[in-house]
Image (cartoon, grey):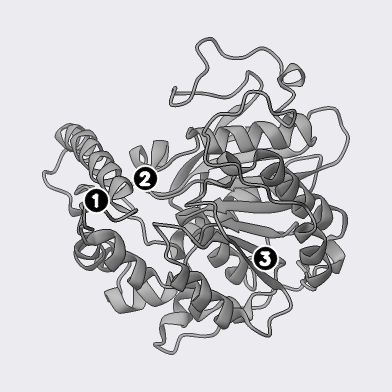
Amino acid sequence: MRDLGERLREIPFSPQGLHLVNLASSSRPDLSRLGQYVRGNRAGSAYPYPEGFEKVVFPSLDGTPLVGVMGLHRDGRKRPGVVFCHGFLGSKSKPYIVEAALQAFGAWDYNVFALDLRNFGESQKLSHAPTTGGWKEGQDVLAACRFLGGMEGVSSVAAVGYSLGAGAVMNAAWQCKRYPYITGGALGWSGYASMEQMTSHISRRPPLDDPFFPIYAVFLFLAEMRRLELRRQLRKEEGGDNPALRPLSSDYRSYVREIAAPHYGMSEEELFALSSPAGFIGEVEVPLMLVHAQDDPVCPIEEIEELRNAAAGNPNVDVWVLPTGSHCAFKGYDEDWYWSVMRGFLDYWAERPAESGFDPGQAREAPGAGGKPRDRMAV
């Protein structure tokens, strides 16, 4: 990882101020290779992927049904694959996921898979399984990697996650000790160290002049839209008020304590421990790179410093902090850098899966039952 990290750091990062759309960039996906677009394709549409991409339903490692979209090159030639994982209150149809999937498929020649984590997107319509903030989401990512890796013509599988998705990818990289489905490296954008600390952060209303306030306001709006959607779903359900269908609120800690932890048969402290990368990142054996910005208003810089300290001494993990980039917005600051770094990481491990230091053919069992939170890795 050290050699790769040094190589990627040579790519100049030249932020010009945040701009959400850069139509002039030469690094945009070559859409001519993707076939005819579905009519009305745009961000937020029900199926913002080209024809030929397939929507699939597949089980997570614990059997929870999930929904994903898969794009395969069906010409008989082997290619690497990559799974993309969205952030909190996101889905596979969010623009940053769609753009990354199309870039990897059309410009980089990858097989791709974008999933809806449990409790989000289309997956929430198939199951009442609540979100955990990283632990079970890691198993969702691994299940997507298993699904994609089982397709003919897929030579290796990487995982890329954003925010909550970065937490899921970190957790998946750790759980690869038992479920070795990531064979092409893992990349996390704007992740976190402690789920408990992040829960307190997003549950507390910031001052109006706090950089996090606009994001907090959007979070409240999305949570309300989600509440209304789940309310309509609940009315269609038989059997009355199912606690798992209660929507996320601004007080996410109450959600963890009253819904998520009881659903999985544990305390909130155990759930927080399982979903906090700082507790296990030192043991990760999958090549893992984490990219963070000093001015991230959602995941404070203290989070990544804690993560970097926890990963110190682990040669498989590289933590990279840039002076700016906000929260998962690196593409808006320097699009060419963003695509170059991501492709550089993916290409490197797609060509060198055997050099990763992790042998997917020698999966080790998780620790036996002993009452400790970490022993709950098993599904």
Judged from the image, the secondary structure of the residue bearing numbered disc 2 is loop
Question: Above or below — where is 147 with respect to 136?
Answer: above
| Residue at x-position 35% and y-position 66% | 198
Three-letter amino acid code at the position of disc 2: Leu
Q: CA distance from mark 2 to mark 3?
A: 24 Å
Q: Look at the numbered disc 3 and give the secondary structure of its residue.
A: strand
* Mark positioned earlier in the residue sequence (2 or 3): 2
- Where is residue 209 shown, x and y percent of the image? 26, 53
**Picture residue at 76% right of the left edge, 65% below the top:** 5
* Residue contact between numbered discs 2 and 1, judged by CB atoms under 8 Å: yes
Q: Residue at x 13, y 43 (%)?
A: 239
Distance from Cα at disc 2 to Cα at disc 1 = 9 Å
Q: Quadrant of residue 281?
A: bottom right
Name above or below for residue 21 compared with residue 16. above
Decide which of 26, 75 is in the foreground and name it: 26
Residue bearing the label numbered 2: 89
x and y percent of residue 110 in the render?
Answer: 76, 39
Residue 288, label in figure:
3
User: How many neighbours does mark 1 have within 10 angstroms: few (below 14), some (14-19), or many (20 or more)?
Assistant: many
Amino acid carrying mark 1 in the image:
Leu
Query: What amino acid is at disc 3?
Result: Leu
Look at the numbered discs 1 and 3 and tell me whether their residues touch, using CB distance below 8 Å.
no
Q: Pointer 1: what residue?
A: 248
Residue 227 vs residue 131: left or right?
Answer: left
**Image coordinates for residue 7, horizontal then vertical, percent:** 83, 61
Residue 83 is left or right of residue 85, and the answer is right
- Marks 1 and 3, the one that precedes in the sequence: 1
- Residue 353 percent across, percent down from the top left: 83, 61
Q: Nearer the viewer, residue 328 or 64?
A: 328
| Residue located 29% across and 59% down the image | 202
